[in-house]
Amino acid sequence: MIAQCRRSSLCFISNHLHASRGCIVRKDYRSLSTVTQKHRSSEQAKPKPLVPIPTKEQLKIIALRAAIPMIGFGFMDNLVMITAGDAIDSTFGVALGISTLTAAGFGQCCSDVAGNLTGGVVDGAVSKLRLPKHGLNQEQLDLKISRIYSTLGACVGVVTGCLLGMSCLMFMDTDKKERAKKAAELKSIFHSIMSDGKDLFHAERATLFMLDKEKDELWSQVATGTKGIITLKSYCGIVGACVESGEVVNVPDAYKDNRFNPDVDTKTGFHTKSVLAIPIKNDEGEVIGAVQMCNKKNDDGSDGVFGACEEQLGRLMASHVTSFIRIVEG
């Protein structure tokens, strides 16, 4: 009985000690957590060190250092794009009928490739300029005011570079490509008109002459049956008389007419007989050229002369030529 009482007492004491130790541990843990939280709160409560605001002079240097490289990139980008686009437009554009915007797109592709190839060159050149240093650390450069000045400097630099790159336009004939495209389009139309017109008039040759007022001469835009360009003074020959008078000229026998110029026959080896010349006039009524048909042939193949029917047909053809010129040239 006594032994059992002792065991009960020992168990009670042991359980009491374990409970006491748990309370002590929990109290110590709570105390430690409280101390840690207070330490963290004190650290958070400490004010962070302020980043010095850059001076106006330093901000100007930031903008300058951001602008200079972009001037180089903008200059190279626009210069290559305009030069390459112009070359593509004046060659492939005229030959294949590529639009100006498409040529500009190809020019931009060339510009992007050139930018990748020359980027290191621009950076290297800028590094040798000995630009002033701002003396700011990374935290100061990350400030909002610093980033604003850097962005503004880069924008001003790229715009300045692009404007400088456009200076090549002063040395280019910007209308040359359009004139070449229009000339190619008109030439194709005129070739079709004169080729079909020759058969329609039953003539051996058909020539479309255009008037160059500055040089005061006529030149053959299209001439069937001969190679090269025929040029003569605007007042020379039967076609010259047509241009000067602005009226249809119908000559049955060219060599019996004093206005006829045999020099062209001598150069080409062709023998002119009958001639029909019709003036081409613009919307203002000014003569801008003439259509000339040579050597009318009858149905049996014998030599013939142009009649009133061919004269009326010639006026209609000249009117169509005027309409095509107006449409193409806008």
Image: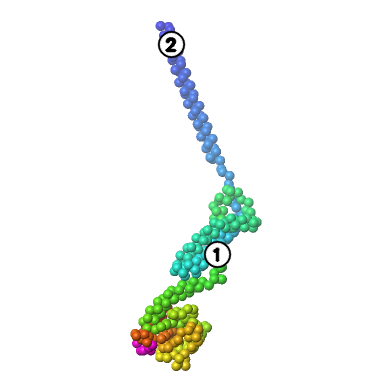
State the residue position of label 2.
Answer: 7
Q: Is residue 62 left or right of residue 327?
A: right
Q: Nearer the viewer, mark 1 or mark 2?
A: 1
Asked whether 272 or 286 is in front, the reply is 272
Q: Position of residue 49 (x, y in %)?
A: 58, 44
Label 1, residues with CA under 10 Å away: few <14, some 14-19, many ≥20: many
Q: Is residue 307 magenta?
A: yes
Asked whether 18 or 176 is in front, the reply is 176
Asked whether 5 or 310 is in front, the reply is 310
State the residue position of label 1.
Answer: 79
Q: Residue at x 49, y 29 (%)?
A: 30
Q: CA distance from mark 1 to mark 2?
A: 103 Å
Q: Position of residue 156 (x, y in %)?
A: 55, 61
The C terminus lies in quadrant: bottom left
Q: Is residue 82 visible?
A: no
The N terminus lies in quadrant: top left
